[in-house]
Image (tube, rainbow, N blue to C red):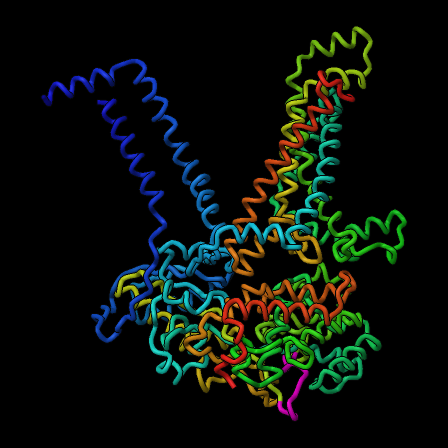
Amino acid sequence: MDTFQKTKLQSILDRREVQKWMVIITFSLTPLALLITFTYLPFAKMIEFSFFKMKYLGPRDFIGLENYQDVFTRTDTRAAILNSFYYMGAGVIQLSLALYFATVLSFKVRCGNFFKATLFFPFLVCGIAMGFIFRYFYTRGLVLDSVLALVGFDKEILPFWLGERSINNYSIAATSIWRYMGQSMVLFIGAIQSISPEFYEAAEIDGATRMQQFRYIIFPMLKPIITLNIMLMIKGSFSAFEGPYVITNGMNGTATFVVLMHQLAHEAGKVGLASAMAIVLLLIIIIGTILQKFLYNLLFSEKSGGIL
Amino acid sequence: MIKKCFTLLLCASVMLSSMLFAGGKTETAPAEPRDLSAMEEVDRNVSMELTFLTHKQGMEEEFAVYQQEFNKKYPNVKIVYEPIGDYKGNIEIRWTSNNWGDMCMIPHNFISETQLPQLFAPLGKVSDFEKKYEFASAFSIDGEVYGISSTGTAYGVLYNTAVLREAGVTEIPKTPQAFFDALRKVRANTDAIPLYCNYGAGSRLADWEWNARGSLTGDANYKNKMIYMENPFSSGKPYNTVMGMLYDVVAEDLVEEDPATSTWDTCKNLLAQGKVAATVIGSWATADTQKTAENPSDIVFAAFPWNNDGKQYATIAADYAYAINKNISDERYQVARDYIIYLTEESGFSFDSGGIPIMKGEAYPKTLSALQEANVTLVLDTPPHPDDIGLFDELNSESELYLGKYPEKARVVEAAMGQSNESFDEIMEDWNARWTAAQISIIGEDYASKSRYN
C-alpha cells in the first residue's frame, strides 16, 4: 500500500509539466514572500486600520465607515488635495523641460555627458537634505534674495517666499521641478536613444529639419514613456511629502495630503483616520491615472484625429 | 531527492505565510509588578551587555565616564548606547517589537500613562520614590513608577540682559504690560529683534503653552481641571491670555522678520550674540545658549512675565525619562535598574545639563540661579485622579487641538501675520467648540458636573 502510493506520487512528480511548475513556484517564492510581507500584508493591515478608531498602541474601536466619512467632510483634507495641483502644475513644467533637454542632449552636444550628469544630480540628493537646502535658499536675505538683488530687484519689494500664503506653495512646488526634472530627462533620453538612427538619416536625406524630426519621429516614438512619466508625475503630486514637510512643516496652508496624514497619525494620534486617508489617496491616484490615459487617447490617438 | 526538497519548501512556505498572517494579533500583556526583594541577588561579576536606546547624540565621552563609574559596581557589564536620530519619530516603531533593547528614554508628554505598563517594567512605588525624587509621579500609573525623569525643565523666558540694558530696560518684566513695554523699547532703541518666536521651528512654538498652566495659575491641578472645564479658552482664562500674548507680539511686529524660516539654532546664536532680546522657551535652552555667548551671565532665564499679587510661578515638567523593557530577564532587569539609579543619583547628568534638579534638596545649576533668586515657585502638574488617567490625552486627540504641540499655535501666529482671515477671537471660539465637542463625546453631556477637582 505504502510503496504503491509512493510510486504514484513519484510518477506525478516526474512529469514534465509538474517539474516546470515546481521550478516556477520555487523560484518565485522568495520575491513573492518579500512582496507579500512588505507590501500586501501592511496594505491589508492598513485597510483594517481604516475601519477603527485607534492609536498605534492601546485599545481599538471598530467604527465602520466613519473615518471615510470624515475624510470627505473635513475642510483640511480638501485644502490638502487642492494643494496637489500646485505640484501637478510644476510637474507639467518639469516634463516639458525634461523633454526639451533630453532631445537636445540626445544629439551631439559639446560636453553632453557633463550636462546630463549636472541635470540628473539633484535627483540623487536625499529629499530631506534638499528640504533644508531650500529652506535656506528661500530665507529672507539669503540665497534667492541675494541673487535677485544682484540682478537689480529691490530687496524691499521681494516677497517672503515661504511666509506668504499667496506664494509659498509655488515656492515649494518649484523645488520639485529642480529635483525630479533629471529623472524624467534620463527616462526620455533612454527612449530617444533606442530609436534607430536610420530614421534620422532617412529624414535628413529627405530634408527634414530638427524640429520636424522631433515632431514626426521622436515624439510619436516617445508616447509610451511620456505616458509613464505623466503617471509618475500624477502619483508624485498627490503624494508630495518631503518638500512641504521639511521646508515648512506643512504650516501656513502648505500641508499636502500626505503631510496632513502624517500630522493626524503622529501628532493627533488618529491612526485610523490617517489610514482611511491613505486608501482614499490610492483611489484618487488610480482615478487620476485612468483620467490621464483617457485624455491622452483623446488628444493624441490617430483614430480620433487628435490635435497633434 | 531534489523534488522532495521542493515539496518540503513548498509546505514550509505555506506554513510560514500562514504564520505571518496569524501574527500580530497577540495583545501585549501588561508587566507584572516585579518584586525586587523576592529576586535572587545578582552576582556582581555577572557578565552581560545591556542596550540603551537614547535620543542624545554626540555624548560618547560622557557615556564612557558613566561606563567606568558603573564598572566599579559591576566590572563585567557593558552598556551599549544606541543613539537614534529623530527619536520621537522612530522610537514608537521600535517599541512595537518586544526585544527592542534593555533600556530606553521615554520622551515627555509622548505616550499616555496607560501605555506605560504595556511597554516598561515597573521600577518601584511612587510613595517610595517621592521621598527622594522630584518627578516621581511623572511617568507612573496606579502608584507604580515606570520611568525616572533624567532632568527637569521649567518654562519661562530666556533673555539677553545686555540687549535689555541697551534698550533702557533695567528690570526683568514681571507683568505682560512691562513685557510688551520692554519689547517695544528694544524695537525702538536697538537693532536687535525683540522676541524670537521660533514659528518655523515647530515644536519650540509649543513651549508657550506650558506657561498657560502653572506659570499663570500657580495651580498644579489646572491641567486636570481642564478635562471638565467649560470653555477653557474663553477670554480671561490662562490659555486665552498666553495665546493672546503670542498673537499680539506677532501682530505688533515684535518678532523676527521671516518667521517661516526661523530655526532654534539661529535663535540660540542670535540670542547669544545679542541680536535677539528674548524668547519664550524651556530652561534647558539656558545652558546651550550660555555656552555660545561671549558673556554667559547676560543670558538669564526668568519666569513668564506674570505675577499673582507679586508672587511668580513657573510650570515645570519632567524631561525624557529612563525606562526598562518589561520583556527582559530578572537578572538583566536588576542590573539595568541599578544603572538607572546610578544615572539619576550619581552621574550628575541633570546638573551638568543645567536642568531643574531631579533629586530633592539637590543644588540648582548656576544657569538657573535667577529663578531661585527671584523666589519663583515651581509648579508641577499633579497626576490625574486614577479614573481620569489618559482622559486629557484622549480629549486632546479627539479635538485635534494639539495641546503640547505646535500646529494650532502656528495657526495663531499665521492669523497674527495676516496670512489667514481669522481673528484671534474666532480661533479661541473654535478651540472652545472643539474642546466641548470632545468633552461631550468622551465624557458625556453632563461633563461639567463630573469634575473631581476644585
In screen coordinates, is B332 left or right of B431?
left
**Quadrant placement of the N terminus of chain B:** top left
Q: Nearer the viewer, residue B348 or B103?
A: B103
Residue B266 visible to the viewer? yes
Q: Tell me the magenta residue range.
A: B300-311
The reply, left or right, for residue B232 in relation to residue B32 is right
Residue located 40% across and 69% down the image: B66
Tell me what residue is drawn at x 70 percent, y 77 percent.
B160
Q: Main secondary structure of the magenta part?
A: loop
Q: Position of residue B451 (x, y in %)?
A: 50, 80
Residue A152 picture location, percent across and down: 90, 49
Say which quarter of the image contains residue A165: bottom right
Quarter of the view holding residue B253 = bottom right
Question: Looking at this rendering, what residue extends furthest in the bottom direction?
Answer: B309
Kindly tell me whether residue B109 is visible in this rendering: no
Residue closer to the observer: A153 or B442: B442
Quadrant in the rendering for residue B143:
bottom left
Please report the residue visible at 80 percent of the width from the left and 16 percent of the height from the top: A212
Q: Is residue B304 magenta?
A: yes
Residue B320: where, in percent of width, then height?
48, 69
Residue pictured at 62% horizontal, 49% vertical:
A257
Let me know if residue B309 is in the magenta part: yes
Furthest toward the left, the residue is A1
